[in-house]
Image (spheres, rainbow, N blue to C red):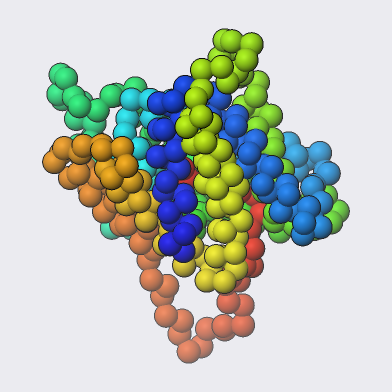
Amino acid sequence: MAVLALLWGSGFLWIRLALHHGLTPVQITVLRAALGAAVLLLLARSARQRLPRGRTLWRRLAVAAFLCNALPFLLTAYGERSVGSGLAGVLHATTPLWSLLIGLALGTERATTPLRLGGLLLGFAGVLLILAPWRESGDIDGPGALALLGAAASYAVAFAYMARAFTGAGAGADTETGAETRTRTETRAGDEAGTDTGRDTAPLALSAAQLTAAAGLSALALPTVGPLNPLSGADVLGLVAVTVLGVACTGLTFHLNYRLIATEGPTGAATVGYLLPVVSTALGALVLGEELTVRAVAGMAVVLAGVFLVKRQPKPKPSSPTEPTSNPRREPKPHTAVPVTID
């Protein structure tokens, strides 16, 4: 769990380093998705897992790849051009807030309590405290922060889409954070894969398929970077940073997340989601020397407190002795399928 949190949380650091050493947001997005897909394709091949072939599933994977990978990867890299890696991790942690907001807007969020609604308001109040729009000259770049919030919102939209497209569930089923959100959506998608293709498609193969689709979608934007040689402005450190980002922080983390869910279950895996902002903030301060104002630190604490409250699910009512209990709620199977990432 500690290794997974370190790899995921350090992704913001590697993005920042790649940007500072000659790579553009588009280049980082394409290379990250392509390298991550290569890792998963190798793992799937070694495990004798075949890629899905059904056209319907591939169309759904393409949409999921855009919302869960291509778009948020690009927005994150764009945002980190002007926003520190530590703050980027905290703004990414607002995904559960957006998920709950989407569920309320669509009328699919059923587990709404005053405590969770209070957490929603508290979380966005923390965002306002960080951005401080009332200040004429703030120390945080507005467009960059909005891009990072857009990436978090993109993940939330993706979870709502995947809950409907792969399982027919509503968006309200996916207001979790980090690994737990991934767990529910990925498991449902894996169960649906067999129905759509006529055979069970293994988790690693589906993960590789989604990241491959994300790399292809991202590559469509490569002509916008200008030079014929797309890496002409990058130095060695920039290439190393994006390689670590793609291989370790994207491809390998999906595999480790799958193993963590299989061994410790969704609750254990969800704990990683709370560690990501802590890791990103610590690495930003220790490695890059990023300075945080008192207002920004307070805002981070308020955001995380809001996320914690949004995550609180109401306790189930105790069943009466006369109620039948032969049909308990099914727990998700301990495997993943379609990958998404929160960093």
State the image coordinates of residue 140 (x, y, percent, origin top left). Answer: 24, 28
Q: Is residue 145 left or right of residue 140?
A: right
Residue farthest along the right direction in this orientation: 198
**Residue 57 seen in render:** yes
Residue farthest along the front direction in this orientation: 236
Among the 4 quarters of the image, the one containing residue 85: top left
User: Which residue is at 40% across, 39% downward?
Assistant: 13
State the image coordinates of residue 218 (x, y, percent, origin top left). Answer: 62, 27
State the image coordinates of residue 76 (x, y, percent, origin top left). Answer: 44, 32
| Count of numbered marks | 0
Q: Is residue 97 left or right of residue 246?
A: left
Among the 4 quarters of the image, the one containing residue 243: top right
State the image coordinates of residue 74 (x, y, percent, origin top left). Answer: 51, 28
Foreground residue, 224 or 70?
Answer: 224
User: Which residue is at 19% across, 30% downward?
Assistant: 132
User: Which residue is at 52% across, 71% downward?
Assistant: 264
- Seen in the picture, residue 238 relative to 157 is either above or below; the reply is above
Foreground residue, 134 or 320?
Answer: 134
